[in-house]
Amino acid sequence: MTAQAKVDKLKEITNIAEKRGIFFPTAEIYGGKAGFYTYGHLGKLLKNRFENLWRSYFLEENFWEIEGNSILPSQVFEASGHLKNFNDPLTECKSCHFRFRADQFVEDALKIKAEGLSIEDLDKLIKENKLKCPRCGGQLTKAEWFNMMFPITIGAAGSKDISYLSPETAQNPYLSFKREFEALRKKLPFGLAMIGKAFRNEISPRQLFFRLREFTQAEVQIFFDPEEIDACTEWKKISSYKLLLQSVKDRKGDKVQEISCEDANKKLKLPKMYLYYMQKMQRFYLEELKIPKKDFRFYELSEEERAFYNKYHWDVYLNLEALGGFKEVAGLHYRGDYDLGAHQKHSKKELAVFLEEKKKKVLPHVLELSFGVDRNIFALLDIFFRVEKERNLFAFPSSLAPIEVGVFPLVRKDGLAEKAQTVNDELCKVGIRSFYDEDGSIGRRYRRVDEIGTPFAVTIDYDTMKDGTVTVRERDSMKQKRVKIAELAKSLK
Ligand code: ATP
């Protein structure tokens, strides 16, 4: 895809999104603020459908959803290390004072990977390559660390009680661990999931809502006995499943290996439990979200790129044409006992637990499945967007489409509109998300539902009044067939 084609695709998606109520900048009437977007009525439906699919897929036996808080006390982030380490490298133009994230700036300018580089290395690259401010050509300051959390004051004016907007949902399950362990019959493993807001004061929010300052995460924290990391009750079922992996070594030449779980266990030394969740995540993308295989890969982070406590860290990368290639949308992190250990130390409350069945005490380890909901929504918009001769459309799978069926009378008169409304009501009653539209020519109504990714359109015409049948048009093929109203819901389902 050429650079111009990328710009055009991003523009097209944005135009449709803003015009049809998928997403738009927040507080637009006041000029908006970078990094904040609102989901309109269709975007919210799409997001809800994604989140519900995610819930029904990942909340397996003994996995539960909780709802914690967005605001958490500073002690939490002292313990988690965010206050000290949740920093991005910042550089500023000495002339126009525009501020950049130094690693992203170097990545864009030199087309290399710069995430995880030290401040010294970033400064060296900027100096050696004589990089200047891309806005005005001015000199850049030395890079410095910038903490990305938003502090907020709790209590009345003058209060010194500083808390923070949480930059990830993960802390809530760690803080709830002991309570939930007790409530869930004192057994491991169990999973605590949370879908909630995360806040990061990103230096360079960009690429629409791919890098936001307020965003939604869907995460599961799995607490388990560390001895179980290489155990998997489902191993026989999954061992021959082929994963799509780009290890650090495969980066050269941009290779992706298709490798069975069995071989990944033996050759890449990835533990069985980790592999079970890798295949589960891959299946979610390929089978549930219907992402084409060529657009999916797991991307291994090098030791310098991953957090020191993550023993294994592979991210899910999807091919996003509008953003120029493969980008991170989710991750699978084996965090060891870092989180519970840190909270145990700082709170001075014991978080190690006694396992009756095994007659031993353990500080559980954590495996984290982390998804950025907004990035996934962006990916769906990018991957399913099609430009055809006479129409633009989102070819969403039915399980994700914000609206499943459009119901149209061919014309408003002769009782067709009333009949169409009755058909629409009946579809809604049986849980099909349909909507009624009588405005404009039938051709234009088809284009409108195509544009928002609606898989089916039902038209009520004069034959309907005679023989009780309607026309069902399928979005992708545009093929039509006659179906009896009595069988319509069943046929659509
Ligand atoms: P990046 O390297 O792109 O900054 P990250 O590795 O810091 O992301 P994590 O802390 O692992 O991200 O967060 C988990 C998920 O949350 C990411 O995979 C991504 O989907 C999402 N995410 C992180 N930062 C943002 C953001 N600023 N805007 C939207 N989604 C985000």
Image (cartoon, rainbow, N blue to C red):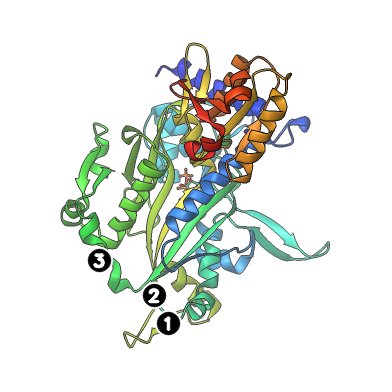
2 and 1 marks in contact (CB < 8 Å): yes
Looking at mark 1, is its residue's CB closer than 8 Å to ligand 1? Answer: no
Residue at x 39% of width, y 47% of height: 284
Q: Label 1, label 3: how many angstroms apart (C-alpha)?
A: 21 Å
Instruction: Name the residue nearer the viewer: 315 or 202.
Output: 315
Label 1 residue SS: strand
Residue bearing mark 3: 230
Q: 254 left or right of 134? A: left
Q: Characterize the local packing of mark 3: few (<14), some (14-19) or many (20 or more) Cα atoms within 10 angstroms.
A: some
Q: Residue furthest right?
A: 157
Amino acid on which disc 1 is placed: Val
Amino acid on which disc 3 is placed: Asp
Residue bearing mark 1: 353
Residue at x 50% of width, y 36% of height: 492
If you read the primary sequence from the N terminus, does the residue marked by circle 1 or circle 3 appear first? Answer: 3
Front disc: 2 or 1: 2
Instruction: Name the residue nearer the viewer: 206 or 6.
Output: 6
Label 2 residue SS: loop
If you read the primary sequence from the N terminus, does the residue marked by circle 2 or circle 1 appear first? Answer: 2
Q: Position of residue 436 (x, y in %)?
A: 67, 30
Q: Position of residue 81 (x, y in %)?
A: 50, 62
Looking at mark 2, is its residue's CB closer than 8 Å to ligand 1? Answer: no
Residue at x 50% of width, y 29% of height: 483
Q: Position of residue 228 (x, y in %)?
A: 29, 71
Q: Label 2, label 1: how many angstroms apart (C-alpha)?
A: 10 Å
Q: Characterize the local packing of mark 1: few (<14), some (14-19) or many (20 or more) Cα atoms within 10 angstroms.
A: some
Label 3 residue SS: helix
Please tell me the numbered disc located at residue 188: 2
